[in-house]
Amino acid sequence: MAELLVAAEANEVIEVQMGDKPVARGHVREPLSVSVLEAARLVIVLDDLRELTGVHFPTPAAVVPAEMAMLSALRDLHAGDKAVLTRATISAQVTEQGRAHLLQVIDDNSECALTIDMRWEQSCAGHSFPPVDVIVYGPRVRLTNRAELETADAPGDGRLSAYFTCLDDQVLEVQPKSSPSSAED
């Protein structure tokens, strides 16, 4: 039903098929409300995630747009596809040696390209999803917590978080390492 509702947004004529045979056809007379379409998209994404991860979890009562974008990205990653995060910030754990290197090569407030090979563990909409080994690429990002990294004492495990934020209308591309095209990129 959710897929039918979403299809009704983009198409003036909707046809329902069973197997290869059309069983019903109708015209969409009025646009559906934004809340109905958002709920339908949420149901589709969550159903896909449940199928892809094998993890069953309750449907959240409400999801903000940023969570919906993250859920869609997680679905894409678990399906083996590339996810694109608009105006995103990503955190990466760095060792003391990695912190020193970052501070050496990235000036205050300057932009850089970012490529990170990491295990992406994500919690969203009140649920933790299985981790995915990914490669993250951002063509124009800024290290947004440089001042904190300069003064922070590393905790017992010696790791700190570095935060990279996309500039302007840039995106982060997140691709699963097991993706066939990741070897070509």
Image (spheres, rainbow, N blue to C red):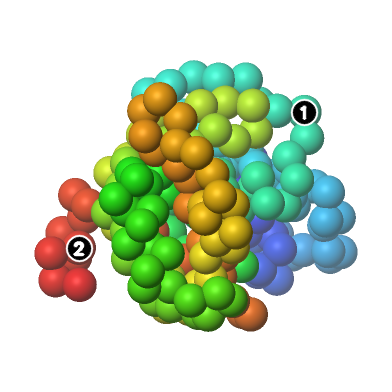
Q: Percent x, y for residue 130?
A: 38, 29
* Secondary structure at numbered mark 2: helix
Q: Percent x, y for residue 60?
A: 70, 28
Quarter of the C terminus within the rendering: bottom left
Residue designated by label 2: 182
Residue designated by label 1: 61
In which image quadrant can residue 125 be found? top right
Do we see residue 175 in this rendering?
Answer: no
Q: Nearer the viewer, residue 160 or 62?
A: 160
Which of marks 1 and 2 precedes in the sequence? 1
Examine the rendered structure and indicate whether residue 111 appears above or below residue 148.
below
* Amino acid marked by disc 1: Ala
The mark found on residue 125 in the picture is: none
**What residue lies at 54% left-to-right and 33% top-to-bottom?**
123
Q: Nearer the viewer, residue 109 or 141?
A: 109
Quarter of the N terminus within the rendering: top right
Q: Give left or right: position of 101 versus 154.
A: left
> Separation of disc 2 and disc 1 at Cα?
36 Å
Do we see residue 45 in this rendering?
Answer: yes
In which image quadrant can residue 105 be found? bottom left
* Secondary structure at numbered mark 1: loop
Q: Give left or right: position of 54 versus 169.
A: left
* Amino acid marked by disc 2: Ser
Q: Give left or right: position of 10 versus 37.
A: left
Q: Percent x, y for residue 66?
A: 68, 51
